[in-house]
Image (tube, rainbow, N blue to C red):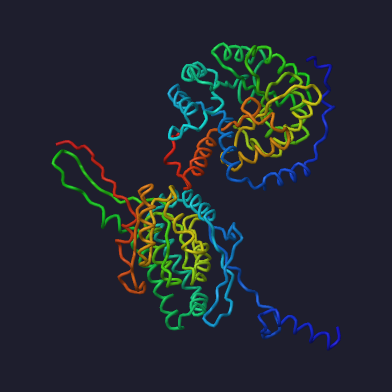
Amino acid sequence: MDQAEKSKTETINGAHVNGQSGKSGRLDVLKTYKIYIDGKFPRTESGRYYILNDKSGNTLANICQSSRKDFREAVVAARKAQPGWTGKSAYNRSQILYRIAEMLEGRRAQFVDELTKQGSTTAQAENEVSLSVDRLVYYAGWCDKYQQVFSAVNPVESSHFNFSVAEPTGVVSALSPENYGLIGLVSVIAPAVAGGNTIIVLASSEKPLCAVTFGEVINSSDVPGGVVNLLTGYRSELISHFANHMDVNAIVYCDDVQEEISKVKELSAMNVKRAVVYKDDNWMKESSHNGYRIMDLQEIKTTWHPIGQ
Amino acid sequence: MKRTDYLVTDSPAIDQVGVEERISRFSKRSIKKESKMAALKMALSMVDLTTLEAKDTPGKVKQLCTKAMHPHSAYSDIPPVAAVCVYPNLVRVAKEALKGSKVKVAAVATAFPSGMSTRKVKLEETKWAVNEGADEIDMVISRGHFLASEYNFVFDEICAVKEACGQAHLKVILETGELSTLDNVRRASDLAMHAGADFIKTSTGKIQPAATLPVTLVMLEAIRDFYYETGKRIGMKPAGGIATSKLALNYLVVLRETLGNDWLNADMFRFGASALANDLLMQIVKEKEGVYQSIDYFSKD
């Protein structure tokens, strides 16, 4: 290859990367943002995408526009994974949550990069990642404690030993906060799985990058496939399916849009789903994590056990 | 039929790659909403609701029979299933429970599932099951003899069981999971049909792999060729491992494409299954109500 031909090739290579030629004229290897279902990373079955731009209008990525069928697949996976996840010891669930925190910490730079691309300043992004790690550790700690704290032995008139214990409600669907890329996801996933539930989360449609990357973190943290499922797409399209699926036991709704809240509550009534609404305006605050958020997704079982005099 | 009229070596060889390619194309058909609804109901009406466990009790069989007659009482347009399939000692219980309905009673016989017994015992068992009231007998072939190329032995055995069945329909289980090759499946199908089978059936459900789409296609093609040759219509029953509606619809596509409309009914085609019925019901209700269903709201059988 002579000199002229060689320089031509480099220009062509350079032109592939949005007109920028890489440092060595090498093509960038860009990440394909897919969804996370049953421990795997499929593309949406619908084949639809939307383009995610940064503030200046540059394309960041093509994001999967998940369909109701993707959601259906995710529910099947979550239902299958649920007995196994509930059956793990609280201590083991705690270890796994802590493991997610470790993995997230290790990938800090990548999350900071994605958050800044989606509009945060570096300081904000650093803070959001730190808080997310801390929140995971916080809920890891709760795994083997909420039972003691919230269960009760009840005084009764008859000769019965009467006690109430918390049991996971089952499969949870969640619409995570629209304005938070990472902390929003962590804040809905951690309390649900700490309490032995499995979950399907719809990520923020404007800030979906972290959701896909968080799926990779979960996938490398000993979380069994199907326990956490992450979809990207439009809330307006999926909200009613998240709320009316008969095999979902609870729905978590984040944000404060009255019309959406009414819809969630109305459709949840079909199978008397637990509808949990969080209107937090700032998910970075301490008030956005507490043990009651675990209890929001628990059912109380009371047992009457006959005893002698 | 005399066995001299038929040579097992007449069966054509099967192109396995071709079969798999054809199945892969059948499995990618898109089925539109109205057709889907009709197909789901049709599939339900073809189910042989099966319980073949050593722990089966009269109570469980009665419960299964109720399910067979009234799969889901919330809707009146949901058809009953085709038959209930049980062990011979529970035939009487099933017959009693299904009295007055069109649901048939099928009994597995001939030392099901292995078939490892003497012919005398097998014939006794068959006669006994028919006497108890079985409308259909599901027999197993002697795979050991078949694989040792003792085709005459297998042929004679099927003839004898057919005779013992009397009026009852005979389904012959090939246990394709133990036949190794599609060539063997085709040979066994031809052999069973010539020996007098009313239905040919893939599997007992006790061996993996059970029914698969490629095996079913080969058997359906054997049925088609047998029809061209003799003018007799033989039925088909894939059994074991068909648990989802989607898969059941794929079977119906293969059936329709291979044998046409004449076979699209419960007299000519059955699904041997237990979990499939509830999945079909869930999809039917989903189509009606527009909401994905949960198994929690359907009776366990």
Q: Is residue A22 above or below residue B221?
A: below
Residue A132: x, y in percent?
41, 71
- Specify whether B282 is left or right of B189: left
Residue A96: x, y in percent?
44, 61
The residue positioned farthest toward the front in the image shown: B34
Q: Nearer the viewer, residue B85 or B113?
A: B85
Identify which residue is drawn at 30% across, 70% down: A287
The quadrant the C terminus of chain A occupies is top left
The quadrant the N terminus of chain A occupies is bottom right
Q: Is residue A97 above or below residue B64?
A: below
Identify which residue is drawn at 60% across, 38% down: B39
Residue A257: x, y in percent?
37, 66
Q: Nearer the viewer, residue B262 or A156?
A: B262
Q: Is residue B94 above or below residue A196?
A: above
- Specify whether B255 is left or right of A249: right
Count the marks: how many? Answer: 0
Identify which residue is drawn at 26% across, 56% down: A150
The residue positioned farthest toward the bottom in the image shown: A3
Residue A41: x, y in percent?
57, 61
